Image (cartoon, grey):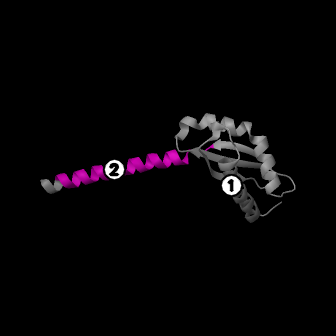
Amino acid sequence: MPTQIRVNRIAERIHEELSELLLFQIKDPRVAGANVTDVEVDRELAYADIYVSALEGESRAEEILAGLRSAAGFIRSHLSKTIKLRTFPEVRFHWDLTPERADRIDQLLNSLRSETDEEEADEEAA
């Protein structure tokens, strides 16, 4: 069983290689604009959970995930040729909600700041 450091290195390498693959080699229009946000490889190297997102947000999630799942065989084959492992993990794709959540939190914080600024301005005027 590999160490956690090795598992993390494998995940980072998959992240780098897959990001390049999405940019330059996969021509499926369904995955255009998809970004790899995270890769998690389990301790047994059986599965690589790949998290993706897009600038358009969750509205394109199903389309992008369908495109990636249909290209999963090609992706796994390409990655196994560039990343030398005895057995290469199965790839599973998931939508990452983190960017949308971060935007929502940012919006809430901005609205709180503007409310606080308005209240301070009202107090100063009074």
Which residue corresponds to the image point at 57% horizontal and 36% vertical from the top-left?
A: 60
Q: Is residue 76 left or right of residue 27?
A: right
- Is 77 in the magenta? no
Residue 20 lies, in percent from the top left, at 68, 53
Q: Is residue 33 left or right of residue 74?
A: left
Magenta stretch, residue numbers: 95-122
In the depicted structure, whether residue 90 falls above or below residue 9: above
Which residue corresponds to the image point at 40% horizontal and 47% vertical from the top-left?
A: 107
Quarter location, residue 83: bottom right
Residue 11 lies, in percent from the top left, at 71, 57
Choose the circle earlier in sequence order: 1 or 2.
1
Q: What amino acid is labelled 1 in the image?
A: His
In the depicted structure, whether residue 102 falls above or below residue 65: below
Q: Report the predominant secondary structure element of the magenta stretch.
A: helix
Q: Which mark is residue 52?
A: none
Q: Is residue 105 left or right of residue 113?
A: right
Quarter location, residue 10: bottom right
Name the residue that disc number 2 marks.
112
- The foreground one among 67 and 100 is 67
- The foreground one among 110 and 16 is 16
Residue 44 in sight:
no
